[in-house]
Image: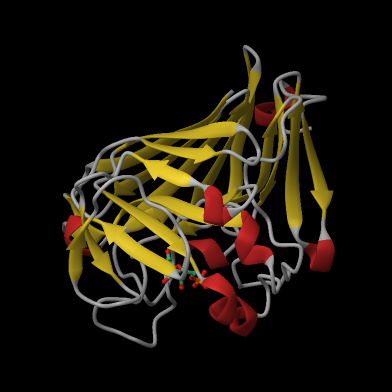
Amino acid sequence: MDSKLEATFGEVDFVEGQNGFKLIEVKNSAGIATIALQGAQLLSWAPAGEKPVIWLSKNAKYVQGKSVRGGIPICWPWFGPHPEESSYPAHGFARNIVWEVAGTKSLMNATQVALRLVPNEAFWPYPSELECRVKVGKTLEMELITRNTGLEPFTLGCALHTYFEVGDVRKIEILGLEEAAYIDKVNGGKNRQSGPVTVNSEVDRIYLDTASDCLIRDPIYNRVIRVEKQGSRSTVVWNPWLEKAIKMGDLGDDGYLNMLCVESCNAADDVVIVPPGKSHRLSVRYSVLA
Ligand code: TA6
């Protein structure tokens, strides 16, 4: 066995999922999780004794080169459509390719898995390295580190496009975005949030210039999910609602009722410049409050 993986014997398992998907299963006394090597995409996480916190579509398709519907896809190095080239993949390419395992570590009441990607894509001519550290325990911590290993600065857009499992999306409230300005991708234009965010129809919004943590209050599951973030200036809230969900083909016809994306991003006006030799770190901690 590779020495960088030895220390976690019993906590980390490498298995094969549908269609040859390589998966890492993590299990310790505080929580369980599954991570796909494709896209370093976390597919599931639950703290011990809790319902799943991360939503994964029952109709998810495991197709090589295509992000799985649900979990935490990593959008990188741009968010949404490419700013100039509409033929480039939406949300960048990092979520569509297989990453390598950089190491696993057993920690106090948690397990860490590190994955690494050195991009070699025509879409992205900038020498760079990407590392994703996932810490699984009673909380879930994810860190996305972008290193500029070249001689020129580049502009970076990125997101942890997190799908949360909720009891009924029509009943939840998101706190933490009060007063933030947002781009409304459903109705067009810019707007300003007043009070908590609620969802009663399609919602697709980029909240700008907000480093605030968010709370998702779920009265059906009787819990609050906390999202604490660093290195992120935008938050996206998304639910496709029924009509779009049907068109998507992998979300399930009523899947939209039990999911909600609250994404920690640097998007739109909040993209960041990474100078040569420097790095950018986006980190998020997810926890369940009773
Ligand atoms: O983050 C919200 C969003 O950008 C929406 O506009 C929506 O299309 C969604 O992401 C899903 O994108 P995907 O490419 O994964 O189907």
The residue at 76%/63% (across/down) is: 58
Provide residue 3's location: percent of width, then percent of height. Answer: 70, 27
Q: In which quarter of the image is residue 81?
A: bottom left
Specify whether residue 69 is in view. Answer: no
Q: In which quarter of the image is residue 271?
A: bottom left
Provide residue 152's location: percent of width, then percent of height. Answer: 16, 58
- Residue 227 is left or right of residue 163, and the answer is left
- Residue 220 is left or right of residue 21, and the answer is left
In the rendered image, the quadrant that contains the N terminus is top right
The residue at 83%/64% (across/down) is: 18
Provide residue 88's location: percent of width, then percent of height. Answer: 39, 81
In the rendered image, the quadrant that contains the C terminus is top right
- Residue 273 is left or right of residue 130, and the answer is left
Specify whether residue 182 is in view. Answer: yes
The residue at 34%/35% (across/down) is: 213
- Residue 85 is left or right of residue 138, and the answer is left
Q: Which of 2 and 123 is in front in this view?
A: 123
Residue most extreme to the bottom: 87
Residue most extreme to the top: 108
Q: Which colour scheme is used?
A: secondary structure
The residue at 22%/42% (across/down) is: 278
Q: In this view, does 103 lie above or below 34?
A: above
Provide residue 203's location: percent of width, then percent of height. Answer: 41, 66
